[in-house]
């Protein structure tokens, strides 16, 4: 921790290797308490990277996740432009947050999601068949994972197939961090406008339909618990959070298996390792690597350090998931480890609502991809595969493969 504000490291800190968190996190983890960091706009915040500290911050409602509260740390101008738009419940604090989240909990419960397994496996099976029929080479991000995750979430919301390309592109633009702020802002506005039109039409015949948006219209909008506009904002969150993240995680999972053939051999020899392998890839990559920005609503002590009211805090789940006090030899991709206590879906009241669905989709992919295409390999040199360094969600630009 530095006493002089001018010597505080700038955040975000660049990764030395695109697929593991910056080495500096490890140095921060050696000291108790947070590190002082300087944000792009010259303000300062407290950075937590230790597993216990990250959970302590994320589990404490005295820290607000509302970017409108003075002192909330700013990641970039492009990110601010997105956060300035109408907030979805992901940016709200209790009790408002719970009011909206509760409308969705039953929809994403494990049991409900498990009932979708046959349909989800059938979608992936069909897309994989088509890929194999077209033959190599392929870009797995565009040719398989984005179509798969988009079809799943769009099916739940009943968003027309011809619009999948549109919402994939808006999601890609919305998570850019270094772009002209007008770009993510316009992308989000286009999505909201699109969903406004879709939901306006859906309001007419919702009682005759059986998709998630129709159920929300009948059960929440009509009785007056949710406004039309609030549903539009909620739908944007679901559609975007529901496909981009999971597709990125799949691409990075394939990358990890192809660069760790011993782990792939283990999985192929013993399919009962599948669930653990999915937890390990979630831990290892922690794709939502900049999510947990908070501001203290009152003085709060964490790990012997008092965060003053109005001070910003960054609690990095990517750091926590690579903390050696919680995961032995954290830089090793090891599908046999017990990784279930990772915080890749965050922790506390904003913990990912879609995690049962994300897990099911990942299990579907890694339960069949390498069996169906056993000779799958990179179509370009491994070093030429680029991580999405400047995105809010970590992933791969493209994943060119052959077989
Ligand atoms: C591998 C895939 C996924 C990962 C790693 C992931 C990760 C996360 C993380 C870290 C958060 C907390 C964000 C924050 O605090 O700012 C979150 C929240 C959320 N995620 Fe996911 N997610 C994934 C897939 C999904 C899917 C498939 C859905 C489907 C609907 C979804 C819906 C949501 C929602 C609605 C929230 C907000 C929860 C709240 O604030 O109460 N996510 N996710």
Image (cartoon, rainbow, N blue to C red):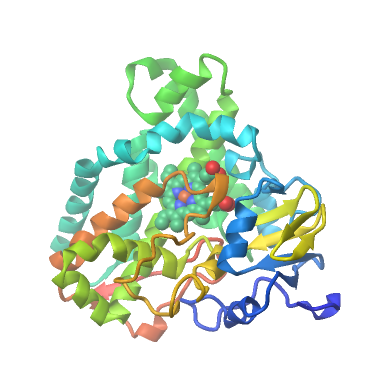
Residue 27, position as x, y percentages in the image: 63, 82
Depth order, front residue of 172/291: 291
Q: Is residue 91 left or right of residue 301?
A: left
Identified at 52% across, 14% down, the residue is 223
- 396 in relation to 174, above or below: below
Percent coordinates x, y for residue 75 in the rendering: 68, 62
Classify the position of the C terminus by image quarter: bottom left
| Residue 236 in sight | yes
Return the residue nearer the eye: 15 or 168: 15
- 382, above or below 115, in the image: below
Quarter of the view holding residue 54 = bottom right
Is residue 136 shown to the viewer in this render?
no
Relative to 189, 394 lies left or right: left
Specify the farthest residue to the front.
Answer: 304
**Residue, x 58% and y 64% (percent of image)?**
52
The residue drawn where x is 35% and y is 83% is 382
Return the x and y of residue 180 as percentages of the image width and height: 67, 61
The residue sitting at 36% across, 47% down in the picture is 356
| Numbered circles on residues, count | 0
Q: Position of residue 391 (x, y in %)?
A: 55, 64
Q: Nearer the viewer, residue 49 or 245?
A: 49
Tell me if 239 is positioned left or right of 184 in this view: left
Quadrant of residue 109 within the rendered picture: top left
Q: Is residue 164 above or below residue 325?
A: above
Quadrant that contains the N terminus: bottom right
């Amino acid at each position: 921790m530095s006493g002089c504000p001018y010597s505080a490291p700038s955040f975000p800190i660049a990764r030395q290797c695109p697929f593991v968190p910056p080495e500096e996190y490890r140095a921060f983890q050696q000291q108790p308490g947070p590190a002082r960091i300087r944000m792009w706009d010259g303000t300062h915040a407290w950075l937590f990277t230790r597993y216990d500290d990250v959970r302590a911050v994320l589990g404490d409602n005295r820290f607000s996740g509302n970017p409108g509260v003075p002192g909330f740390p700013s990641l970039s101008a492009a990110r601010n432009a997105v956060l300035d738009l109408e907030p979805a419940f992901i940016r709200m604090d209790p009790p408002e947050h719970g009011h909206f989240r509760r409308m969705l909990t039953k929809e994403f419960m494990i049991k409900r999601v498990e009932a979708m397994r046959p349909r989800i496996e059938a979608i992936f099976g069909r897309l994989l068949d088509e890929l194999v029929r077209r033959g190599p080479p392929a870009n797995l991000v565009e040719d398989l994972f984005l179509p798969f995750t988009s079809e799943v979430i769009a099916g739940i919301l009943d968003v027309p197939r011809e619009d999948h390309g549109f919402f994939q592109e808006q999601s890609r633009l919305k998570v850019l961090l270094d772009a002209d702020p007008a770009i993510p802002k316009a992308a989000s506005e286009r999505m909201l406008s699109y969903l406004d039109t879709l939901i306006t039409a859906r309001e007419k015949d919702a009682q005759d339909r059986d998709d998630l948006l129709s159920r929300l219209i009948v059960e929440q909008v009509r009785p007056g618990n949710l406004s039309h506009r609030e549903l539009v904002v909620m739908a944007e969150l679901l559609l975007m959070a529901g496909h981009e993240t999971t597709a990125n995680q799949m691409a990075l999972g394939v990358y990890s298996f192809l660069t760790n053939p011993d782990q792939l051999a283990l999985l192929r020899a013993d399919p009962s390792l599948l669930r653990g392998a999915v937890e390990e890839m979630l831990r290892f990559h922690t794709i939502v690597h900049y999510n947990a920005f908070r501001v203290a609503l009152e003085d709060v002590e964490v790990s012997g350090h008092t965060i003053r009211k109005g001070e910003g805090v960054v609690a990095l789940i990517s750091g926590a998931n690579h903390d050696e006090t919680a995961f032995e030899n954290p830089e090793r991709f090891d599908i046999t480890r017990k990784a279930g206590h990772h915080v890749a879906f965050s922790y506390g009241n904003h913990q990912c609502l879609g995690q049962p669905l994300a897990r099911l989709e990942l299990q579907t992919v890694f339960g069949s991809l390498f069996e169906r295409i056993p000779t799958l390999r990179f179509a370009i040199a491994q070093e030429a595969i680029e991580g999405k360094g400047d995105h809010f969600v970590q992933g791969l630009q493209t994943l060119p493969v052959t077989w």
